[in-house]
Image (spheres, coloured by chain):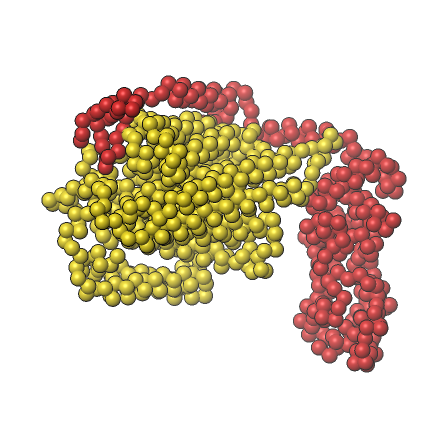
Chain colours: A red, B yellow
């Protein structure tokens, strides 16, 4: 231990400790440190008196203001509900057709509806609602379950292939995986399905498969997709004669669909969104399609 | 390395390597159907490699018996180099994930390259790989000088350095395979956690035994901080990682805690990891290298005491401010918040103590980029501790929580404080350690300084902007009670700031590469012949305490 000495620069004494040449000055703790320590501790104590803070075994101090975060949240929700009440009633009860004719209502649909769509739907259907592989476009006027407002609203409420008790249920069976059709039959069916929309794409080999494919279609597919392949909306079976495809219309994708089946899911929104929001979203989806087709 | 060990020590090292091989082998066999098997094989392979290295040199001449009268710096040398390699690797990954937020496709469709797997590689690589090795390396160096005693034995420092890096390797490779305990900054799974506990106990025992031989009756401040770092990190690590493995042959485990208790344990850990790993440890570094470089006494011994106990006591309470407005009871949030507010005072007292120590040496700060690194580090320490206490206030947190503001705050601390103090310490340490006249190039230090500073400033400013914009957009309501923006609107609005952040991160990464190059070239320089006496020699006990 060395002796305390005077630091020539500051004129202060050192503590007399030294570690490999490092010394320390005996500078007193500056007043500003003590001041702010006192201020912050006082603030904390004041806070402890006012708000819930300290536990004591069976409970905790409630603070004299008796404020709790649950109450604060409820206040926020009440305030928000009061603001929303200005339009929610109207959207829950008015007929869709009437709302669609109401410019003021549609102005809200185009702002709030867009927020709802972007937060709830766009992850799958795309920000412009034009879909993507596996997820249908909502603006091409082609609908699996129907595109009138009531039907869309119902799809939003119960979803497709969900846990909801009223869920829409639609499944394309895995004809290959379940051993219902062999490879040759599935090829014939693929050729036939392509012939429904793009007959000129088929070469000689494919053309030869058509009769067998037609027969297989009548036996296996027509119950859902209809005798003419134009789809049946009651069971959500798509039209196979048009140029709109969810998973893809090329031979490989159709083969895969026939082999492994399809069972797309759309979540249900009955618990996630209120009735007014769902109806407003329905109008937004229809409005996007209408604007696209104008 | 091995030539510095006596034959007896080489034998004990071989026994330890054999234990590592057996442990790795058992893990490898038990977990052969799992990533656990790969990690077992990794440990075993490392043990076999080390065994061969030692066997190769086993019959080499014994070291000079007078060597015991010198400080033992080989582990520090290895730690410094490894730390800089981790820095370059982990900041590269960090900048990659920053660009992923601009170009989300840059994953090559590979699972290991997805954002969720690379991000913990970055955080673990930087905090533990870079920061941990830097702390271990400098703590060995500081401990010996301030105690005037050689490390208590020659084997355990190697156990610490090698074992710790094996832990880091298991961690980052595991993430890429998809192995994670899903706890932030505590992602490694149970077997790696247990492995680290053993390493950490060796570290603590080594520290205590060496400190017990000190010559100065008082323990220097740096050692208070290093000891707090080692001890508290051990407690945090053990409690937060209490978990039950699915089976002894699987990497997966489930936390002992559930629900909000789990969240609270995690953020008690998370916040105190920031406190005792990223603050206490690096304050230990600052308290030695800053006064050494500046050639000034510490401004105030009393402020050191107030700050140390203030930080050590108060941080422990503050973790709940990470869970404001959650299922955590209101009173727990409030309690954490009040202690967070008081915490700013000892934090600023520490920063002030460091800055006021520079009184009488400001011309050195101007001219010497190494000291300037440490000066800027102290400034950023002050800035980010103030910001931290501010963000812990509930209403402020309701704006900042879950936004990029948090990311900016963390990087103000990690880049501005932790990394800068380490660069300052390394540039002070490396010439002394390798007995070189100076660093290879002072211009490269200068370049590193400006790259690091501009990178940090760009990074932090862009995250402040994006964070506050995010927070404001998320809480904006229209008059009719509906949201003014969708979430994707806020993502769109972030684009320019994400580009700026990635550019800032790149500058910082570039600085790290220059730093590694400069250190490497310094090591390659010839040793100086008439070396100045950097350190008072260790006082050799006639009867070394065992």
Residue B261 at x, y percent in the picture:
47, 40
Q: Which quarter of the figure is the N terminus of chain A placed in? A: top left
Residue displayed at 75% across by 56% down: A136
Residue displayed at 26% across by 57% down: B1
Total numbered circles = 0
Q: Is residue B18 above or below residue B480?
A: below
Q: Is residue B84 above or below residue B301?
A: below
Can the viewer see residue B139 in this picture?
yes
Q: Is residue B296 above or below residue B119?
A: above
Residue B199 at x, y percent in the picture:
32, 51
Farthest left residue? B542
Q: Is residue B161 above or below residue A272?
A: below
Residue displayed at 38% across by 28% down: B352
Q: Is residue B226 left or right of residue A147?
A: left
Residue B2 at x, y percent in the picture:
24, 59
Residue B98 at x, y percent in the picture:
55, 48
Nearer-the-camera pick, B487 or B420: B420
Residue B363: quadrant of the picture: top left
Q: Is residue A254 left or right of residue A48?
A: right
Residue displayed at 37% across by 18% down: A31
Nearer-the-camera pick, B376 or A28: B376
Can the viewer see residue A151 in this picture?
no
Q: Is residue A50 left or right of residue B53?
A: right
């Amino acid at each position: 231990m060395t002796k305390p000495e005077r630091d020539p620069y500051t004129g202060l004494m050192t503590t007399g400790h030294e570690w490999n040449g490092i010394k320390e000055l005996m500078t007193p703790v500056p007043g500003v440190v003590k001041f702010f320590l006192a201020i912050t501790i006082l603030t904390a104590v004041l806070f402890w008196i006012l708000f819930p803070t300290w536990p004591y075994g069976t409970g905790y101090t409630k603070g004299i203001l008796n404020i709790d975060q649950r109450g604060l949240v409820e206040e926020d929700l009440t305030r928000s509900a009061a603001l929303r009440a200005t339009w929610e009633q109207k959207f829950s009860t008015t007929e869709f057709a009437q709302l669609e004719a109401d410019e003021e209502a549609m102005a809200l649909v185009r702002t709030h509806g867009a927020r709802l769509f972007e937060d709830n739907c766009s992850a799958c259907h795309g920000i412009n609602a034009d879909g993507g592989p596996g997820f249908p476009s909502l603006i091409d006027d082609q609908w699996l379950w129907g595109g009138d407002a009531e039907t869309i609203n119902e799809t939003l409420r119960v979803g497709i292939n969900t846990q909801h008790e009223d869920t829409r249920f639609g499944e394309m069976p895995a004809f290959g995986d379940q051993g219902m059709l062999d490879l040759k039959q599935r090829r014939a069916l693929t050729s036939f399905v392509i012939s429904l929309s793009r007959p000129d794409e088929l070469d000689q080999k494919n053309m030869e498969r058509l009769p067998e494919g037609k027969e297989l279609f009548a036996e296996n597919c027509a119950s859902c997709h209809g005798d003419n392949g134009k789809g049946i909306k009651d069971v959500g079976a798509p039209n196979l004669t048009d140029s709109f495809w969810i998973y893809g219309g090329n031979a490989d994708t159709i083969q895969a669909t026939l082999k492994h089946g399809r069972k797309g899911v759309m979540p249900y929104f009955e618990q996630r969104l209120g009735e007014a929001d769902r109806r407003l979203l329905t109008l937004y989806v229809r409005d996007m399609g209408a604007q696209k087709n104008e | 390395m091995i030539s510095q060990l006596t034959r007896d020590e080489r034998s004990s090292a071989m026994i330890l390597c054999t234990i590592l091989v057996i442990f790795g082998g058992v893990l490898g066999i038990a977990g052969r159907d799992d990533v656990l098997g790969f990690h077992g094989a990794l440990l075993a392979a490392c043990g076999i490699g080390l065994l061969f290295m030692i066997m190769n040199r086993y019959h080499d001449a014994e070291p000079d018996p007078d060597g015991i009268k010198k400080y033992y710096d080989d582990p520090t040398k290895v730690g410094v180099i490894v730390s800089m390699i981790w820095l370059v690797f982990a900041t590269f990954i960090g900048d990659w994930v920053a660009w992923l937020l601009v170009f989300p496709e840059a994953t090559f469709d590979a699972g290991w390259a997805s954002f969720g797997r690379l991000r913990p590689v970055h955080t673990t690589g930087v905090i533990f790989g870079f920061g941990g090795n830097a702390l271990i390396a400098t703590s060995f160096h500081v401990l010996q000088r301030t105690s005037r005693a050689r490390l208590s034995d020659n084997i355990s420092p190697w156990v610490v350095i090698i074992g710790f890096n094996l832990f880091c390797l298991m961690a980052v490779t595991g993430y890429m395979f998809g192995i994670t305990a899903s706890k932030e900054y505590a992602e490694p799974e149970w077997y790696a956690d247990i492995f680290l506990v053993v390493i950490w106990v060796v570290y603590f025992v080594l520290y205590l035994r060496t400190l017990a031989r000190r010559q100065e009756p008082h323990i220097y401040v740096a050692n208070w901080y290093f000891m707090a770092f080692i001890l508290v990190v051990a407690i945090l690590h053990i409690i937060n990682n209490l978990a039950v493995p699915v089976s002894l042959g699987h990497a997966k485990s489930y936390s002992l805690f559930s629900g909000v208790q789990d969240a609270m344990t995690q953020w008690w850990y998370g916040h105190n990891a920031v406190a005792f790993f990223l603050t206490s440890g690096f304050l230990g570094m600052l308290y030695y290298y800053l006064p050494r470089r500046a050639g000034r006494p510490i401004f105030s011994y009393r402020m050191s005491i107030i700050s140390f106990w203030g930080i050590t006591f108060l941080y422990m309470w503050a973790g709940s401010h990470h869970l404001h407005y959650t299922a955590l009871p209101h009173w727990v949030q409030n309690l954490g918040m009040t202690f967070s507010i008081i915490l700013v005072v000892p934090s600023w007292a520490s920063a002030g103590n460091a800055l006021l120590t520079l009184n009488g040496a400001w011309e050195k700060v101007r001219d010497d980029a190494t000291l300037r690194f440490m000066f800027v580090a102290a400034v950023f320490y002050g800035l980010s501790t103030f910001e931290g206490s501010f963000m812990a206030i509930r209403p402020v947190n309701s704006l900042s929580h879950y936004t990029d503001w948090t990311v900016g705050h963390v990087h103000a601390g990690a880049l501005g404080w932790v990394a800068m103090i380490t660069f300052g310490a390394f540039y002070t340490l490396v010439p002394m350690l390798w007995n070189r006249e100076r660093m290879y190039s002072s211009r490269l230090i200068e370049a590193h300084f400006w790259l690091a500073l501009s990178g940090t400033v760009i990074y932090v400013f862009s995250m402040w902007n994006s964070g506050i914009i995010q927070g404001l957009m998320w809480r904006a309501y229209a008059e009719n009670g509906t949201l003014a923006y969708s979430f994707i609107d806020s993502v769109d609005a972030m684009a320019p700031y994400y580009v700026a952040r990635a550019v800032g991160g790149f500058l910082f990464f570039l600085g790290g590469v220059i730093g590694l190059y400069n250190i490497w070239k310094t090591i390659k320089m010839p040793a100086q012949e008439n070396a100045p006496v950097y350190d008072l020699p260790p006082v050799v006990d006639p009867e070394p305490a065992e």
